[in-house]
């Protein structure tokens, strides 16, 4: 570890890149504490602490949402736009062709993603303000005029674009993914305060619970690393053929199928689905039509039930894991490419049989990843009642993002070190 750190700081360009990234993350944390005028921040923080869904959203903004800061939307609209265009590339032939044009095509799609972020930020900002106003009877956003509303939407939209720009600057330095590091910084920033509150509130009777809590956290981190790095290797052989006086091919290799092919995207999709019904119900709870008001209240109450919330959340994560994997993993194309390159899976005929085999194997592998992601998502709902510790919430989603970001960042730094010290190795 020490030798690795010495290598990093001996390489001037890597050291400067790391310091530059740290400086940008500090700028993000400063912006997260600059509030938008016109709201009582103390009352807003108290409201967030009692609302599980909004607390989950606040996780991805690093506390900026409950501070009602200028970057309160975080990089959420940008992530949403990225997911939309990832799906559109699979559906729209023009975008699919553009994605195959190399760097030029990727830059065009990235530009469309940036443009789509602006209206999405405005829509999400307006929805969030209306939700706060309706749920608190206007107490948190009292006496806000139309001009103040427009100014607030412009400020929070500009904040999202600012974070998007910071994220791209970070990505250009090849020290991890910029957007992921911003989310990572937001998650980690709340950890010291949570630990402090825990040690203040823990007495002698809760020491055992604290130890259990720590053990669960360590086991969870180890499991996340195992699943994140886990792959199922499919053996692939290439037929030997003669070109001139050279023998080519005859190579045996493998095709890795990742256990967690979809990453954290299924959890993000599931959160969106879970948030949508109670959010819509809030707009109709004061309806003059009795059955609409009663149905809205029933939806709000059932989603507030911890058992239903956990089961529904788990099922949504499993469903979206399979859905997103089916979108990004195309066994037919893989089978065609293998056949064109003279490759085959031993014991499986090329073509449709190979495609069917890959699809069957991937579905079995994804099952383990889907169940794991579902358990990680509902982990706070399980650990909280068991340990009785509420000041630190083991957010399975936050742990998954944190571990994944650390692994990705370390790999990128290692790759740069190998490039610079190749002769020494």
Image (cartoon, rainbow, N blue to C red):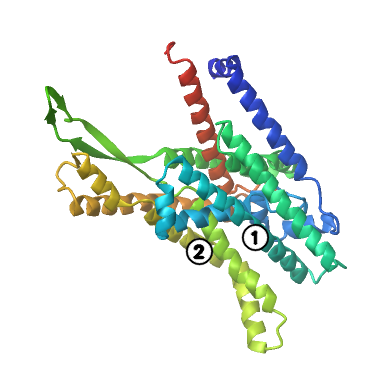
The residue identified by callout 1 is 119
Mark yes or no: residue 417 visible. yes
Q: Is residue 343 left or right of residue 182?
A: left
- Image height check: is 364 above or below 422? below
Helix, strand or loop status at disc 1: helix
Mark yes or no: residue 382 visible. no
Residue located farthest toward the top when viewing the structure as drawn = 424
Q: Which mark is residue 311?
A: 2
Name which residue lies at 39% across and 39% down.
230
Q: Are marks 1 and 2 in contact (CB under 8 Å)?
A: no
Q: Is residue 63 left or right of residue 117?
A: right
Quick one: quadrant of the C terminus? top left
Image coords of residue 68 (percent x, y)? 77, 54
Mark 2 neighbour class, 10 Å CA radius: few under 14, some 14 to 19, many 20 or more: few
Q: Nearer the viewer, residue 330 or 245?
A: 245
Name which residue lies at 75% across and 57% down.
154
């Amino acid at each position: 570890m020490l030798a690795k750190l010495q290598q990093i700081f001996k390489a001037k360009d890597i050291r400067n890149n790391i310091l530059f990234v740290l400086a940008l993350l500090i700028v993000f944390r400063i912006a997260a504490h600059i509030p938008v005028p016109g709201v009582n921040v103390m009352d807003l923080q108290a409201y967030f602490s009692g609302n599980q869904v909004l607390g989950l959203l606040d996780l991805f903004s690093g506390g900026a949402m409950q501070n009602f800061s200028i970057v309160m939307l975080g990089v959420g609209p940008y992530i949403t736009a990225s997911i939309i265009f990832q799906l559109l590339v699979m559906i729209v032939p023009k975008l699919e062709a553009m994605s195959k044009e190399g760097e030029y095509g990727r830059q065009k799609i990235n530009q469309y993603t940036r443009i789509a972020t602006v209206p999405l930020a405005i829509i999400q900002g307006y929805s969030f303000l209306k939700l706060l106003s309706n749920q608190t009877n206007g107490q948190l956003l009292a006496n806000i005029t139309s001009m103040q509303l427009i100014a607030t939407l412009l400020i929070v939209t500009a904040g999202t674009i600012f974070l998007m720009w910071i994220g791209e600057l970070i990505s250009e330095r090849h020290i991890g993914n910029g957007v992921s590091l911003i989310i990572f910084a937001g998650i980690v920033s709340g950890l010291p305060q949570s630990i402090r509150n825990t040690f203040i509130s823990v007495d002698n009777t809760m020491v055992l619970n604290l130890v259990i809590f720590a053990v669960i956290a360590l086991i969870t981190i180890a499991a996340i690393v195992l699943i994140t790095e886990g792959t199922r290797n499919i053996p692939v052989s290439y037929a030997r053929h003669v070109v001139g006086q050279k023998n080519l091919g005859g190579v045996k290799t493998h095709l890795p199928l990742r256990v967690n092919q979809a990453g954290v995207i299924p959890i993000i999709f599931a959160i969106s689905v879970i948030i949508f019904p109670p959010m819509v119900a809030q707009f109709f709870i004061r309806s003059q039509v009795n059955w609409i008001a009663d149905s809205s209240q029933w939806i709000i109450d059932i989603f507030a039930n911890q058992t239903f919330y956990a089961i529904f959340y788990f099922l949504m994560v499993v469903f979206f894991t399979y859905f997103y994997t089916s979108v990004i993993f195309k066994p037919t194309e893989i089978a065609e490419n293998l056949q064109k390159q003279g490759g085959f899976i031993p014991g499986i005929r090329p073509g449709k049989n190979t495609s069917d085999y890959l699809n069957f194997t991937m579905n079995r592998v994804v099952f383990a990843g889907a169940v794991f992601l579902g358990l990680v998502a509902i982990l706070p709902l399980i650990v909280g009642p068991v340990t009785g510790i509420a000041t630190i919430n083991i957010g399975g989603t936050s742990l998954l993002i944190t571990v994944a970001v650390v692994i990705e960042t370390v790999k990128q730094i290692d790759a740069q070190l190998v490039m610079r010290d190749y002769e020494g190795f």
